[in-house]
Amino acid sequence: DVQMTQSPSNLAASPGESVSINCKASKSISKYLAWYQQKPGKANKLLIYSGSTLQSGTPSRFSGSGSGTDFTLTIRNLEPEDFGLYYCQQHNEYPPTFGAGTKLELK
Amino acid sequence: EIQLQESGPGLVKPSQSLSLTCSVTGYTITSGYDWSWIRKFPGNKMEWMGYISNSGSTNYNPSLKIRISITRDTSKNQFFLQLNSVTTEDTATYYCARSPTGRRYWYFDFWGPGTMVTVSS
């Protein structure tokens, strides 16, 4: 299976700031990486797939970049609703596998 | 809009079977897409467990292949998870989710809110 290493595990920021979350695959996954936001009691939200394609409804302050083994999710001008848990997931190879998550907290 | 909702027992005894239902509204599961079960362990690790396709074929994570079964009831627009011989290591929050069909489309665009299952005697 492709191992996904996500960093940092925890991140503290203030509204208005920009943050980046990284995801590294144990082998090349081409561009096939998805990002999700998870909040307690709410359905997980797909933000980005295929590395940089925004899912319908994802605000433009979210962006994804990278290919091969190294990927980044960037959130610009943080809004209060952006705080939560973020996961990366490779969708290049079966079985799909997830990173360990990054908790984005309010500073 | 499409909605998914998991249901089932919150407590299962070791060695027994875990059975969960995913009820889908707003989309017919035979119309397209694949329908997956995914779980999140305490400590946040996520694992894709398997899917049933819109045609009824299944595909399972090799790590679970001998214990898992995913079936469906098209008349109720539901699909089901059965995990046999559970241990405390199967304690997790279980999610159902939808993904587009096809190679390299194994990302999940709609999820249920999740249901927590504890395996304990």
Image (cartoon, grey):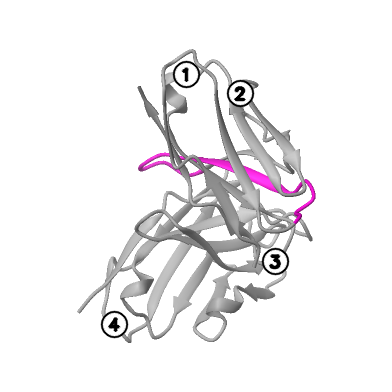
Q: Amino acid at mark 3?
A: Tyr
Q: Which residues are magenta?
A: A28-44
Residue B77 is at least partly visible in this image = no
Q: Which mark is residue B30?
A: none
Q: Residue at x 41, y 41 (%)?
A: A42
Check contact, mark 1 vs mark 2: CB within 8 A.
yes
Crowd around label 3: few <14 · some 14–19 · many ≥20 (10 Å): some
Which secondary structure type mostly characterizes the magenta part of the structure? loop
A42 in magenta = yes
Residue A35, placed above or below residue B40: above
Name the residue beneath numbered marker 3. Answer: A94
User: As rendered, which of A107 and B76 lies closer to the eye?
Assistant: A107
Q: CA distance from mark 1 to mark 3?
A: 35 Å
Q: Amino acid at mark 2?
A: Pro
**Crowd band around label 1 with a 10 angstrom C-alpha radius: few (<14), some (14–19), many (20+):** some
Give the residue number, with chain letter if any, for mark 1: A79
